[in-house]
Image (cartoon, helix red, strand yellow):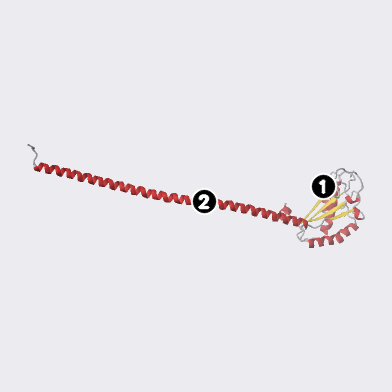
Amino acid sequence: MDPTTPSDHRSDLLRQTELFIILGMAFAVFLALVSKENNKLNAENEKIGIELFQYQELETKYQELEGQLERKEEEIADLRGRINDVERARQEESNSCAAPFIVLDDAQGGHFFATNSAKIDPGFSAFIRGELRRTLEQLLVDFPETNAIYIIGHTDHRRVNRANRNFEQQAVNLFHGRLSNWSIHCNSNAELGLLRAFAVMKELKQSSIGRGSIKHWQAYSGGPFTNLDGEIVRELNNKDIPALRRIEIRLMSISEEAIQQ
């Protein structure tokens, strides 16, 4: 016979029921935890998805901006090219509208300077302060952008045989009136050309030409080195060529920066 009693059987059923209840509750807690973690993962995935979408949008925007930047750089380069073209055209126009050179040479009649001398005689002085001054004044009216006058002295090829070891100081003294003899000894035609340019420049400045508009005066020497066509001579021939003995007067327009240098 089975020694168990009905009460023992009921006790076993109760224990089994309690066990199933406990297992069910544990499983429910497990499901709740899994669901919570899934929700958390879904939220993080959603956040990552949003960030990825935003990143893609930013990348697309960056590519668009990069394309716009390239187009702007091309436009800037094009504008710079146009500006350079305009500046070049304006410079060419300015050059084409530059005041004509004035050339005084012995071939025009009479001698402006005595041989080996930069002395300006009374007749030449009257010409500079009269006719030449009026011509230059009219050119300054016709070309109002002029603010500088360059004077270049040229000689023929005949040799200068006298020597002067202190030419530069004597030239400065002559220009500022500390010497009066413009027939100082020159070492070369280059020095003689410069001295003659100095002499003409001094006469013009004393005539008060371009007062207020001419900011810069400069004397240069072409010596015997430049032919009438502007080319450098190939050989000095020691000949008497009146047309080579000349003074060039150039009206220029130069920048304030160049004047100050």
Q: Secondary structure at mark 1?
A: helix
Residue under the point 28% across and 46% down: 31
Q: Amino acid at mark 2?
A: Tyr
How many angstroms separate mark 1 from mark 2 (CA)? 69 Å
218, 182: nearer the viewer: 218
Where residue 101 sits, quadrant-wise, is bottom right
Horizontally, residue 74 falls left or right of residue 168, namely: left
The crowd level at tag 1 (other Cα within 10 Å; few <14, some 14-19, many 20+) is few
Residue type for callout 1: Glu
| Circle 2 residues within 10 Å: few <14, some 14–19, many ≥20 | few
Q: Position of residue 256 (x, y in %)?
A: 72, 55
Which residue in the rendered view is the most extreme toward the front?
Answer: 1
User: Picture coordinates of residue 136 (x, y %)?
Assistant: 82, 60
Q: In the image, residue 208 lies at what x, y percent? A: 81, 60
- Seen at 35% across and 48% down, the residue is 40
Spot occupied by residue 185 in the image (x, y as percentages of width and height): 88, 47
Q: Nearer the viewer, residue 110 or 44?
A: 44
Query: Which residue position holds label 1?
Result: 168
Residue 182 visible in rendering: no
> In the image, which disc is placed on residue 131?
none
Position of 84 with respect to 33 (left or right) is right
Which is more N-terminal, label 2 or label 1? 2
Residue in the picture at 50% in, 51% down:
60
Residue located beneath label 2 in the image: 62
Q: Secondary structure at mark 2?
A: helix
User: Left of 83 or right of it: where is 41?
Assistant: left
